Image (cartoon, rainbow, N blue to C red):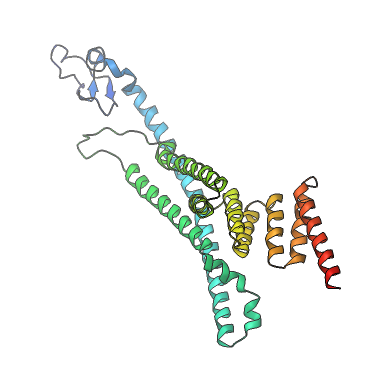
Amino acid sequence: METFRCKYLKHEKEEIIGFCLNQYCSNATQFCYECLTTNHLDHLIDCTRFCKLSDYINELIQVYYQSSKQFKEISTKLQNCFEKIFKIMDQNIKFLDRMNQQIINKDYLSFKGQISIIKQFHLNEKENKRQLQLGELNNVLETMNNMVRDYNMPYDQNNSCPYRRIKIEEILSVNEDKNQQNIEEAARLFTEGQALSNLNKKHEAIECFNKVILINPQHDNAWKNKGLELYKLDKYQEAIQCYDCAISINPQLYQVWSNKGLALIKLNKQQEAIECYDKAIEIDPLYQNAFNNKGIYFQYYIQAKHYTI
């Protein structure tokens, strides 16, 4: 086999000992000892000798094996999630068809027992959450398409561009940055909503909390504060639905249980209100507001009863 010799003048007879892996290097990819001290002096760390290239390739193969294993595990989990979602959607369609049939058959009593489902849909809260989730899935799809492009060997048949190892962390870093920006934006909007609430600008505050919820549907405090603003606007049923969303995310929010009790009192649902106060006290036996609200209700109830008699 003919010895691989350098082509640069003054050291054209030197034997080539490796390849430069720096993708921005404009010199010849192959290098001899003299090239190291002249053409590649500012990026010696990227100059790999033949004896090390095989180790580097084996390391790269292991990276692909590990990545492949991780992708297969994620793919299996995603497939299981999609199957569950499709199953639930099919069940929901059948359930809604049954409700529609109740309307057609004028079975209003049965329909009334399930009216809360229509109320939630009417508020568009669940639809907003679903659209946000679909947007996140589209971001994942875009990331996957980018990964397909990135995992293709980035060089042509003429080896015009040297290959650079790809790490999963590098590919996902863009999404991580975007998530961080969303977190910061949600925090900013939440603080703005609190400030607007303090200024008694209820509608503007609600708009801020809605934006927070669009970014993060699991933001329990945004649901709670939106409920408070709706309560101030005498929209008690809508406030209760917000409180329910907050509680579904974090059942230990004793303040929300107490606030829900206040809204239920406004709707003359006394027994449900007492249950909410009791739940708040169960979570935090030292929460004074729940005791006060419960006491105020009983005082009002006894006075009203005595007056009626």
From this viewpoint, which residue is outermost toward the bottom?
105
- Say which quadrant the C terminus sits in: bottom right
The picture quadrant where one finds residue 230 is bottom right
Residue 240, position as x, y percentages in the image: 64, 61
The picture quadrant where one finds residue 12 is top left
The picture quadrant where one finds residue 232 is bottom right
The total of numbered circles placed on residues is 0
Residue 114, position as x, y percentages in the image: 63, 74
Residue 249, position as x, y percentages in the image: 62, 53
The answer to whether residue 195 is left or right of residue 251 is left
Please determine whether, in this image, residue 61 is positioned above or below residue 252.
above
Question: Residue sitting at 72 percent across and 68 percent down?
Answer: 268
Question: Residue sitting at 19 percent across and 37 percent down?
Answer: 158
138 or 149: nearer the eye?
138
From this viewpoint, which residue is outermost toward the left?
9
167 or 271: nearer the eye?
271
Residue 76, position as x, y percentages in the image: 51, 54
The answer to whether residue 109 is left or right of residue 150 is right
- Say which quadrant the N terminus sits in: top left
Question: Residue sitting at 51 percent across and 66 percent down?
Answer: 86
Please determine whether, in this image, residue 186 is positioned above or below residue 54.
below
299 or 237: nearer the eye?
299
Please determine whether, in this image, residue 170 is positioned above or below residue 286.
above
